[in-house]
Image (cartoon, grey):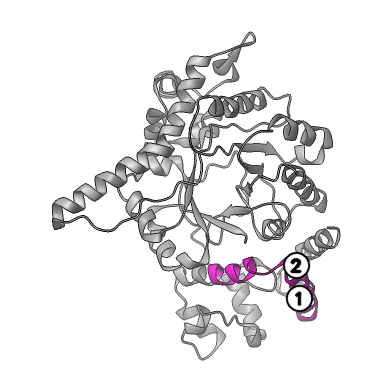
Amino acid sequence: MTKLFYRIGSAAESKLFEEMNRYYYGIVINANLVSLYSKWLPVFLQKVGKPFFIDPMTYVFAFDLENIKKNGDVRKSFEKLVRSYGNQIKRIIIDEKRELLPDDFIKDGKWNETLINDLVNNVFSLQKNLITNQFQQTLSEILDIIGEKPEMKEPKLLFLVPPYFYFESTNDPWYQISLHLSKIAIKLGTSHRIYPIICISKEIILNTDEINRIFEDYEGFNGYILWISNLDEIEDDEEYLRGLVNFTRMFSIYKKPIILLYGGFLSLILSKKFISGYVRNICYGEHKDVESFALGGPLPRRRYYLPFTHSKIPESKARLLLSSNPDLLCRCEICSKISHENIEEFFDNIEDVDFNKHFMAIHFSEVKMDIDKLKNLLIKDKLLCEKMKLENFGISYKHLDKWISILEGE
C-alpha cells in the first residue's frame, strides 16, 4: 500500500490533520517547526495517531542566510533550530553570521570531525529526544491538572534522517559532505533505522553516470528519501519525468523503502512499482525548488482539485467550467455535503478548509487504486478532457499524455 505522507506547514493545519486522519499514512515535520512548536506537537501527534519523521532542514544553512531572516534577524524557528544543533553550527550561523561553507566540513583533504560529529549527534537528538521529552512533560502536566495519567501512546518515529545538503553534481563538494555525514550517522551507532535524504538538481537524473555513482555510493542504508529540486510532475518535459522513473528504478534494486520528499500524481504512479511512498502538503507542495524558502503555511488562494485532470485550478476557472458542465461537479463525501442549488452557490458556500478536505478525499481514493486502474483512469480522463475542450477554459491537461506515456513504457 502506498504510504502517503503529508507535511504539516503550520500549527493552524493541525485540526485538518486530526479530522481527516484516515486519508493518509503519516506526517512529515520540518525541524524548525519542531523547535518552534515543541509544546503542542507531541499532543498533536498523539491525537492523530500517525507515524512520522522529521526533515532536519540542514540544507538551508548552506544558502544565503537572508532567505531565513526577518527584519534583519534569523527567524525565531531557525534560530532555535541552530542552537539545538550545537555550538559548532551556532558559532558559524549566529556568531559569525554567515552560511555554512564546504571548508567548514573538509579542508585540505581533512574532515572536521568535531563539527561533523557534533552536528550528526545533535540532529539525531532533536529527532529522538525532543519529541519524547516533550511528550513525557505533557503527560506530567496533565497528571498535575487532572490527578491521573491519561492513556496516551507515544508518537512513533519511523526513522532518523542525517544532516544533508543540496548538490548539483557528484563533483560538487556538498555531495561528498552529505555522503560523509550519512555514513558517519551509521558509525555513531543507533538502534533507529537511518534514511538519508539525497537532495539533487534535476539535471542529474538525465545523466546515467551520475545516477550510477550516487546509487553505488549510497549503498548500505535502511531506506532512502529522494528530493529532486524543482521537479514539476505537471510542467516539466517528459525527459525529466523519465529521469525520475530511472532514478527510482535504480534505487529500487536495493529493495529498501524509498520515499520521494516532494511528489504528486506521478509519484503515486511510481509508488505502485519502485517507491514506498511520497510526501506533499495538503493541496500544495508537490514540488519544491531547494532555493525557495517559503516559511509559512498553505497558499491563501482558493484552488479546486479537479479529479479528471488530477491537478489544481483557480476557483474562478472551476466556477466557469462546472457552471457550463454541472454534471462534472465532484460527488465525494466532502463536496456532496455542500448545500447548493447551482454551481455558483456551491462555490459561495464551500469553506476554505473544504477545498483541502475535498482534495484529501479524492487523492486518497486515487492512492488506493492499483497500477492498472490508474492507467485506465488516466486514459478515461484524457478522453473526457478532450471531449470537454478544456483548453477553451484555460485548463491544461497535457500532463496526462506524459503520465500515460510513462505508464505504457513500464
Q: Amino acid under label 2?
A: Tyr
In percent of width and height, residue 138 lies at: 25, 48
Q: Residues within 10 Å of mark 1 (few under 14, many from 20)?
A: some
Query: Looking at the image, which residue is at 65% across and 33% down?
Result: 220
Quadrant assignment for the N terminus: bottom right
- Confirm whether residue 75 shows in the render: no
Residue 74 belongs to magenta span: no
Quick one: 168 or 120, which is closer to the camera?
A: 120
Q: Which residue is mark 2?
A: 397
**Quick check: 156 above or below 105?**
below
Quick one: 300 or 372, which is closer to the camera?
A: 372
Q: Residues within 10 Å of mark 2 (few under 14, many from 20)?
A: some
| Main secondary structure of the magenta stretch | helix
Query: Looking at the image, which residue is at 45% across and 46% down?
Result: 157
Q: Amino acid under label 1?
A: Cys
Quadrant assignment for the C terminus: bottom right
Q: Secondary structure at mark 1?
A: helix
**Quick check: 42 above or below 121?**
below
Q: Which residues are magenta?
A: 359-388
